[in-house]
Image (spheres, rainbow, N blue to C red):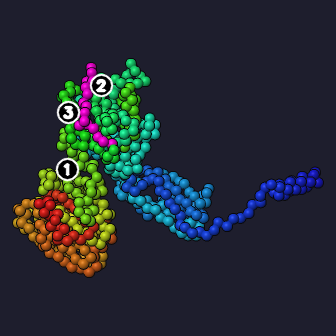
Amino acid sequence: MKILKYILVGLLAIVFVTSCNDGIDPITSVDPGPDLTAPIITLKYPIEGTKIQVPELLASINIQFEATDDIELKTVALLIDNVQIASFAEFKDYRRLIQEFLYDKVSNGAHTLTVRATDIEGKVTNTTINFEKKPPYTPIYPGETFYMPFDGDFMEKISFKLATVVGTPGYAGMGLKGVNAYKGATDSYLTFPTTGLLNNEFGASFWLKINAVPDRAGILVIGPTDPAAPTAPNNRKSGFRFFRENAGGKQRFKLNVGNGTADVWFDGAAAADVDPALGEWAHFAFSISSTECIVYINGKVAKQGVFTGVNWDGCDVLSIMSGAPRFSGWNHLSDLSYMDELRLFNKTLTADEVQAMIQYDSPYKAKYSGEVFYMPFEGNAKELNTNTDATKVGSPDFVAGKRGKALAGAPNSYLTFPAGDLTKTKEVSAVFWMNVNPSPDRAGILTISPEDLTNAGYPDKQNKRTNGFRFFREGNATSQQFKVNVGTGTGESWNDGGKIDPVVGWTHFAFTVSGTKSTIYINGELAREATFTTGIDWTGCDLLSIMSGAPRFTEWNHFSDLSLMDELRIFNKSLTQTEIQTIFNAEK
């Protein structure tokens, strides 16, 4: 048997050698060449500015990325806020890694995500983006029952329920507001149950960037089934249908509403036409009551008419961006346009309310050179350059102001805002109006200050002044002095500013910080300047406080200011007196 075994092994060896030299190329090494470039990273999700908004205290984020190298990857690491959360060192393709990683510990607030790739020669590439987990959404308008911003998901932000997706609708990769918008696709739309959305009064508000192909489409529909025409339903006796149709190259928008026995048309004819060739976002709103219906386009009434009240029999489904499945008999099918900021209401919408929503949503273009922050306080605490809401602490309010509405201070109340974009240069300026309430007799007004770690755990003893700035007031019922304190890294610089009599009413304030001095202006006139040599230091300064020294400047009782503030602007440069006077004269 041993002899037979050796014979078989020998035969196999001969066959193997023969095969390797008979039509099969031998394996040879190939020189890959020099390692010339660092790895390349493509981060697919999240993208810059992504906002996550879920009810859970900790959210999940599915990180999607690709890393490639010209020779060989060694490691790829993921870091959130500079803390490593994952690392990859084994690759099926040693030059390329396509990966998804689910991270489920994202807390509220702003975060940075870094993908770090290292190649075999030690060359490193870092790709970093900023994203945010926002607290659960709360309605910002009276009667608001539904809000869908389309920022990377099809979630309704009040109920936190996902819409049902039909077909393959997508995202535009841009939006009127936020980082994304709905993008229509053929035979594609969203549906949502109407539970909790139907009322004797009803309103809707949204934005569209119109694609004229197809030349007619459904946009919002809440309608019943049509037993008489199940394959081409067109039962218009209840619910409503908001849709568009070609009108000589423009698109005409129409509302049809059922009262239970018949349907009523609200067609504004030419007043309801929008030219899709403009390529612009257009705002649409409509309102249904027991006496009338109104259609608004870009804030203007396109059609208004008498109505006896909507009937909701059989209306259990909302369709978004298509007439299907309940209103397709006239080919009002999927809309390939973009949609953003969809809101529904259990009340009618007035012209003033529609205008407020347009202003709230509309992209803002900085009015002055260097302006990086503008908060006009028009009934909300939105910063318009970033379209971002400040965080409210306590119960600040909004009342009649210098221009429109103003922020009204309240005890233990103020606003906070991330200071990131405000601390990118060594110069800063701020301008604003105040109607000063001298009670309390001292208060913080604007503060970008670091946390006082030596007094950690003592919120009333925060007073680290070596970084950032603190603008505040002190005095009595008849004289208030305004001061700015600037941290230079190793020390501080004081500017004791100027005094005003609070009874004069609205007063314009400005202060500037350059590399060599700080200045305070009152009503456009120089009150005082103070010189220093090292400029402002921003170490640890991640938070702006508005109308209070809290939470970072409290030891000397500079707490909430009960005054009124209006037209707050912050700049990434030191304004000249001429620039300050230009702003003052434009707003006085």
Q: Quadrant of residue 192?
A: top left
In the picture as drawn, the residue positioned furthest to the front comes out as: 248
* Left or right side of 157 for 465: left
Q: Quadrant of residue 160?
A: top left
Point 45% across, 53% down: residue:
45
Instruction: Please report the bounds of the magenta region as a residue range.
Output: 259-276
Q: Nearer the viewer, mark 2 or mark 1?
A: 2
Foreground of the two, 342 or 581: 581
Return the disc, 1 or 3, that comes first in the chain's sequence.
3
Q: Position of residue 485 (x, y in %)?
A: 21, 72
| Residue identified by numbered label 1 | 379
Q: How many marks?
A: 3
Question: In the rendered image, which quarter contains the C terminus?
Answer: bottom left
Point 33% across, 71% down: residue:
539
| Residue identified by numbered label 2 | 238
- Relative vertical location of residue 158 with respect to residue 544 in this rendering, above or below: above
Return the disc, 2 or 3, that comes first in the chain's sequence.
2
Point 77% across, 58% down: residue:
25
Q: Is residue 250 visible?
A: yes
- Relative vertical location of residue 465 with respect to residue 169 in this rendering, above or below: below
Q: Is residue 267 magenta?
A: yes
Instruction: Give the alpha-carbon distance from disc 2 to disc 3, as whole Å.
Output: 19 Å
Q: Secondary structure at mark 3?
A: strand
Query: Which amino acid does the dot numbered 3 rest on?
Result: Gln
Query: Which amino acid does the dot numbered 1 rest on?
Result: Gly
| Residue identified by numbered label 3 | 304
Q: Residues within 10 Å of mark 2 (few under 14, many from 20)?
A: many
Q: Nearer the viewer, mark 2 or mark 3?
A: 3
Q: Position of residue 236 (x, y in %)?
A: 31, 24
In the picture as drawn, the residue positioned furthest to the top comes out as: 228
Tell me if label 1 and label 3 are in contact, CB under 8 Å. no
